[in-house]
Image: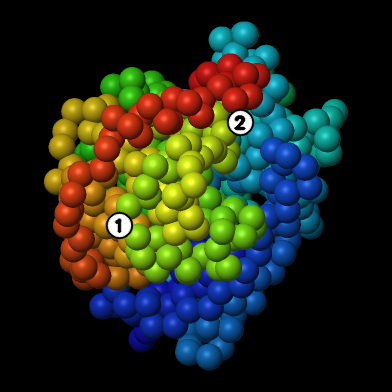
Amino acid sequence: MTTDLLVIDIGTSGVRAARVDESGTITHARHERLLPARPSPGVVEHDAGAIATAAQTLAERLIGEHGAVAGLGIAAQRATTILWERASGAPLGPAISWQDLRTTGTCLMLAQRGITLAPNQSATKLGYLLDRYDRPRERDVCFGTIESYLAFVLSQGACHVTDATNAGVTGLVDDDVSAWDPAILEALAIPPRCLPELVDSLGVVAKATALSGAPPIAALVGDQQASLIGQGCLATGAAKATFGTGGMLDCAVGELRPPFARRGASGTFPIVTFQRGGARRWGLEAVMLSAGSCIDWCCQIGLLSHPGESDALAGSVRDAGSASFVPALSGLGTPRWDFGARGAFFGLDGSVGRPEMVRAVLEGIAHGGADLLEAVESDAGLGVESLRVDGGMSANQTFLQLLADATGREIAPSAVLEATTLGAAFLAGVAVGVWGDLDEAVATVRPRAIVAPRRKLDRSRWREVRAKAEGAIPMLSALSF
């Protein structure tokens, strides 16, 4: 009988399906690029139907080519919001991305009533979709984030569920992530009947009858928590950072929820790292709104011909000269949280060329990563000895060295770029008995290398230039949550 696991991983820029064996090795993988649409400033949308079709097609291909699997795990970008008809499963309009800022005004109005929600959470996005497609609140519709919708489609409507790692960042649950918050539902006129059932992160919820062999859907998990588990970060104080479109640093803090309700003094958030048997494990998350997106922007304006060029070009010079860059294309996250900040170069003079500018971009992202680490340590009251790293930017050796220099810590890049796949596989594998527990599963994890600090970056100068980028759009800067 097979012990292979199938994982579907939905990111901001595409869909990935992979098979993972009992040694924790990704044996086969397929990917389809599906970029979000950006029809106007601040508006970011996905085609939910296209995502589900791509996921089913890629998964079916892996089963057809390599045989049945023991279970299916689903990892997905969090807070992206979908509304669909229960009977048909058809989405009502585009999915609204977690990056979308169209409901900022609603967040500001709710703040005047003492209700604190962020525009990157699902709550106000769901209110917007209901107002547009079911204003009387009479239709039989379902709300879910991407993993919820995909489980619904693959089970052919047999399950409408979400887990605590995903529900916890919707803005729709209570502080313990144990139930939907009736006050928020009332404020946004959200009918409870459209909400998914809250379930464990690992455990069979239904069979994926839309796939050959109907494998059990055995794990649902948010992408960042999947990455945390996929890099073996279960012990208190273990931390990882994922540098993709944005940057997310997550640190495991144990069985007790952090003491602050929504946001710590240094700008981090309590998250559920996983839930099993109703028991939740907790962590802290720090967020950088723009990371790899800055490299994509460099390509758009001609500084780079392709993203991979950034490594060698930035590594061809010893430093960025007088140039500094603040990676705030979508605002600043932890620790400042200024949605009105905007990216900027500072200190440009005639000696600064393409290599220095690209190195300044990588250095700015590395400084942002150091900000995340310092914030987590401050809010958690603990030290992080080393930092595991994954995501597309973990392939960039120049960036990894700059990150080590900015943080003053050893950096341990993942053996695979997307550790989310492994995390979802570990959860699903424990649920169906491939491994006895998560400790046994993550024992298979080994980093690709260790990158040690070589010199110190000027953190004081960084804080000065970061402050200069703040407040560029006052209305957005006024948003607090």
| x 44%, y 83%: residue | 28
Q: Residue at x 32, y 77 (%)?
A: 25
Q: Where is residue 4? Give x, y as percent.
A: 38, 79
Q: Is residue 481 above or below residue 134?
A: above
Q: Which circle, 1 or 2, is nearer the viewer?
A: 1
- Compared across the picture, whether 307 is left or right of 81 comes to left
Q: Are marks 1 and 2 in contact (CB under 8 Å)?
A: no
x and y percent of residue 412 in the render?
23, 60
Work out which residue is located at the far bottom of the displayed protein and give it: 65
* Cα distance in 3D space between marks 1 and 2: 40 Å
In this view, which residue lies farthest toward the top? 113
Judging from the image, what secondary structure is the residue with disc 1 in? Answer: loop
Q: Amino acid at mark 2?
A: Pro
**Is 44 rendered above or below residue 481?**
below
The N terminus, quarter of image:
bottom left
Residue 318, x across and y down, in percent: 30, 57
Viewed as shown, does residue 114 lie left or right of 461?
right
Q: Residue at image x 56%, y 74%?
A: 31
State the colouring used for the structure image. Answer: rainbow
Q: Which circle's residue, 1 or 2, is located before the other in the chain?
A: 2
Under tag 2, what secondary structure? Answer: loop
> Within 10 Å of the Cα at label 2, are there few (<14), some (14-19), or many (20+) other Cα atoms?
many
Residue beneath disc 1: 318
Q: Looking at the image, which is closer to me, 223 or 291?
A: 291
**Is 170 left, or right, of 187 in this rendering?**
left
Q: Residue at x 62, y 19 (%)?
A: 474
Describe residue 409's horizontal placement relative to residue 179 as left or right: left
- The amino acid on which the numbered mark 1 sits, given as a three-letter code, is Arg
The residue beneath circle 2 is 119
